[in-house]
Image (spheres, rainbow, N blue to C red):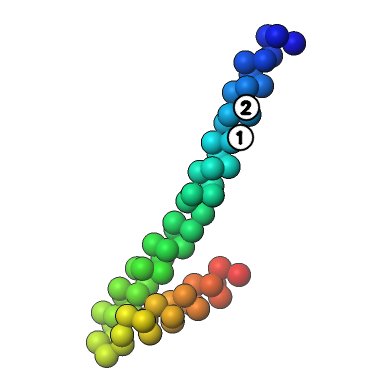
Amino acid sequence: MRKNLGIYAFLILAFIALFISRQSYKNFSLEKSINSCVISQMKKSQNMTSLEARSYCESEIKVKKN
C-alpha cells in the first residue's frame, strides 16, 4: 500500500490540474472563433457595425456548435 501512495497522490494532483485547466480554458476557442468571424464579417460588409457582426457570429457559431 505504501508503494502505491506516490502513484495515488500523482493521480489526484493530475486530476485536479486537469479540472482547473478545463475550467480556465473552456471558452477560449469559442471566443477566438467569434472574434475571427467578427473580423471577417466587418471586412465583407463595410456598413456592418461591430455589435451587429458579433451578434450575427454568436448566433451562427452557437447554431453550428449544437
* Identity of the residue drawn at 56% across and 75% down: 63
Residue 6 is marked as none
Which residue corresponds to mark 2? 11
Q: Residue at x 74, y 11 (%)?
A: 1
Q: Quadrant of residue 5?
A: top right
Give the residue at the far bottom of this rendering. Answer: 47
- Are the residues tagged 1 and 2 within 8 Å (C-beta)? yes
Residue 43, given in percent of the width and then of the height, sits at 26, 79
Residue 25 x, y percent position in the rendering? 47, 51
Question: Looking at the image, how many numbered discs can be counted on the residues?
Answer: 2
Q: In the rendered image, which residue does mark 1 sit on? A: 15
Q: Residues within 10 Å of mark 2 (few under 14, many from 20)?
A: few
Q: Position of residue 12 (x, y in %)?
A: 63, 29
- The foreground one among 47 and 23 is 23
Q: Is residue 10 above or below residue 43?
A: above
Residue at 63 percent across and 19 percent down: it is 7
If the image is split into quadrants, where does the C terminus sit?
Answer: bottom right
What kind of residue is marked 1? Phe
Q: Is residue 54 above or below residue 21?
A: below
- SS label for mark 1: helix
